[in-house]
Every structure is written in C-alpha cells, then in structure tokens.
Amino acid sequence: MPPPLRSALSAVLIALSCLLVPFGTLAGWAAYGLADTGRYVTTMAPLAADPAVREAVVDTVGDDILRAVDQHLDVRPVRGSVRPFVHDAVRSFTHTRAFRMAWDTGNRVAHDAVLHALRAEDERPVTVDLAPVTAQVKRQLIRDHVPFAARIPVEHTEVAVLPADRLTTLRKGYHVLEVAGFWLPVAAVAFAVGGIALAVRRRRAVAATALGTALGGALLVLALAVGRDLTLGDLPAGVSHPAAGAVYDALTGTLRTAAWLLLGLGLAVALTAWLTRSLRLPRPARRRGAAAPEPVPAPSPAPAPAPTRARA
C-alpha cells in the first residue's frame, strides 16, 4: 500500500477511535454499572448518611404521616403541634441501623422493579412502598407518648420511581445501551490498533491517539457537569435539590472517575511519546554520493630474528 494511502487510512481509523471513546465509556457505564443491582445498592448505600438525603426522607415520610392523620383521624387543629414531633421522630429514625437496612432494601427492590420493567413488556409504573418506614416511625412516636400516635394508619404509600408513559422510550434506550455497552469500546480499541498499525510514523500515531483519548475524557467530564445542571434545573417543585444532587453525584461517580482516567492516561501516553522522540540520539548524517573510506591495511608482521649460535 502506498504511504500516502496508509497515512490517510490510519488517520481515519484513529479519528473514529477517538470519537467512540466517550460514547463507549458512557454506554459501558450504563450497561454494566447502572444495570447491576449489587453495584447500584453499593453505590447508593453511603447516601443513607448524607444530611440532604436524610432531610428529604424526613420531609417525604413526615408529610405522608401527617396527611394520613388528616384523612383518617380528623384532628386538623392538632396538626401544627404534632408536626415537630413527627419530623423529629423520622429524623431520629434516619440515624438508626434499621433505616440503613431499610434504605438498602428499598433501593434493591426499586432497582429490581426498574430492570424488570425495562426488560419485560409490563406497562405499569414502577413505585416504592414507604409503609415499612411509616411503621418504624409510628413505633417511635408511641414510645415518645405523642398524642394520637397509636391511631396513625400505616398505609402503603407508593412513590413513583418510573412513570408508565416513559417506559416505552426508556425500554428502547436500554436495549440499545445493552448492545452499545459492549461493541462501542471494542470498536474503539480495534480502530485505534488498526490505525497505529497502518501508520507510517507509528510514534506520531500513538501520540495522536492518546491526545484524542484525553480530549474524549475531557468532553465527558464537561458533559457530566452540564448534565448535572440540567437535571437539577428540570426537577419538579418540592424535590430537594441538594438530595437530588447527592444522588446524581453518587450514580455518576464511577463514570466521572473513568473520564478523568481517560484524560490523565491520554496525556501521559502523549507526553511519553513526545519525550522518547525528543530524547532519541540523532544518527550521523551520511552525505549522498560520498565515497566510502578505504580500509586501512593492517601492518605486516616484522620478520623473526635469525637464531644465534653459541660459540664453543
């Protein structure tokens, strides 16, 4: 293959590889990170100790309990005096081991329900039941001798996690991610190897591939920051922004680490290629048409001295 054609084909393959790096990383994270229930629960577990998430749980569960009191007990004048006790009881419950266990269990159940909805043809919305948390808070209120605590109904309060009208779109996107999560990274690596192998100057091709990978990592970091702002900006009224931000940061932590790793590794490889090229010892230039130096003849050995005869 002529060198110009090799260089052009190498450049195309390297460019395709660099374009696929951020998309392949994103698809792999979604397909193998978010879709794994064990990893999801492990990622969400530390949020049980996050103050913003705890306060969001206090507001949600506490308001549900007070709403149930209004509907079943008809003691609205007492609501203002009971509200601090209810919220304090929920806040105290969020610091217990039982809450951490309920948090992990709820996340596991919600994740399994979401995966089932995305993989099956069920069109029902995905919800999470808060009844176990309400029962725990009710027992705490009874121990604190709060009025009417024993009459608080423990209802199955379902919080929507995935609405039914978005299931069809999300299901198609999930199936695409399952395929892209495997093939995009494989294609990126194959294009990079092929482009470097075809390059006339392989050291320069390695440096270009590394710089393109670093650029892809930088774009991914920027996309995560922009996505965080857009996600928090589109939240409905009443949703805690600090809690939603903590959840977003926890879910995208692995992806953010991968993006910074691509950026750092790409810059390191490019710098190594440049340094090895700069520090290489120059070879002595040979003028074209210059005659080769004649070999110097080796000195002939001296004649051996004649033997002397001893006199009698």
Image (tube, rainbow, N blue to C red):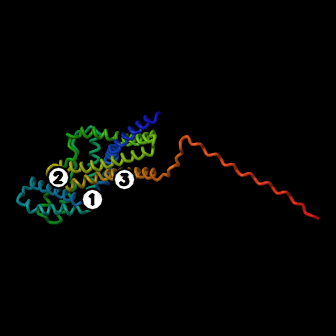
The one of 5 and 291 positioned closer to us in this rendering: 291
The disc labelled 1 sits on which kind of residue? Arg
Residue 135 drawn at (x, y percent): 20, 57
Residue occupied by mark 2: 239
The disc labelled 2 sits on which kind of residue? Val
- Report the side of 247 relative to 148 (left or right): right
Residue occupied by mark 3: 264
Which callout, 2 or 1, points to the residue nearer the camera?
2
Residue 157 drawn at (x, y percent): 18, 51
Residue occupied by mark 1: 100
Q: Quadrant of the C terminus?
A: bottom right
The one of 41 and 275 positioned closer to us in this rendering: 275
| Residue 182 seen anywhere in this rendered image of the structure | no
> How many residues crowd mark 1 within 10 Å: few (<14), some (14–19), many (20+)?
some
Residue 274 drawn at (x, y percent): 42, 50
Tag 1 or tag 2, which sits nearer the N-term? 1
SS state under label 3? helix
- Report the side of 150 relative to 279 (left or right): left
